[in-house]
Amino acid sequence: MASNVSLTRPAHIPPEQWERALDDLETYRRELPRLLKDGHANRYALIKSGQVVSVWDTEGDALQAANERFGAEPVATYKINPLDVARFSHVRAIGKEQQCPS
């Protein structure tokens, strides 16, 4: 993930699943400004393999689309929340504070 905040993988989560989740979160963080600019606030983004595949009005619609298109393959669904812009900025600021000075 682009922020420098260290996240620890829970023991019950396989490493490949953890990495995929971090990649999906990073994709959401990266695409969030564009999604908001395009008027998608409070809709649901379907994310797979580093890209926003589609955007839906409800979580149920997003999950149905994921199932129809990808079956049992892993995908991520994020509610496009305008407050996440500030949240990600805060997390980034914490990460900078945690870095050791060079």
Image (spheres, helix red, strand yellow):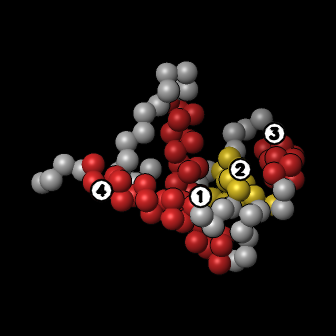
Would residue 69 be seen by someone viewing this image from the given angle? no
Q: In this view, does 5 lie to the left or right of 98?
A: right
Report x, y in % for residue 93: 36, 59
Amino acid type, mark 1 = Tyr
Crowd band around label 3 with a 10 angstrom C-alpha radius: few (<14), some (14–19), many (20+): few
Amino acid type, mark 4 = Lys
Q: In this view, does 15 lie above or below 58?
A: above
Q: In which quarter of the image is the C terminus?
A: bottom left
Crowd band around label 4 with a 10 angstrom C-alpha radius: few (<14), some (14–19), many (20+): some
Mark toward the viewer: 4 or 1 = 4
Amino acid type, mark 2 = Thr
Q: Is residue 8 above or below residue 92?
A: above
- Residue positioned 42% across, 33% down in the render: 8
**Labelled pair 2, 1 in contact (Cβ < 8 Å):** no
Give the Cα distance between marks 2 and 4.
28 Å
The residue that label 3 is drawn on is 71
The residue that label 4 is drawn on is 96
The residue that label 1 is drawn on is 28
Report x, y in % for residue 97: 27, 54
Q: Quadrant of residue 14?
A: top right
The residue that label 2 is drawn on is 77
Give the Cα distance between marks 4 and 1.
21 Å
- Residue positioned 71% across, 56% down in the render: 79
Crowd band around label 1 with a 10 angstrom C-alpha radius: few (<14), some (14–19), many (20+): many
Amino acid type, mark 3 = Gly
Helix, strand or loop at mark 2: strand
- View extreme (left): residue: 102
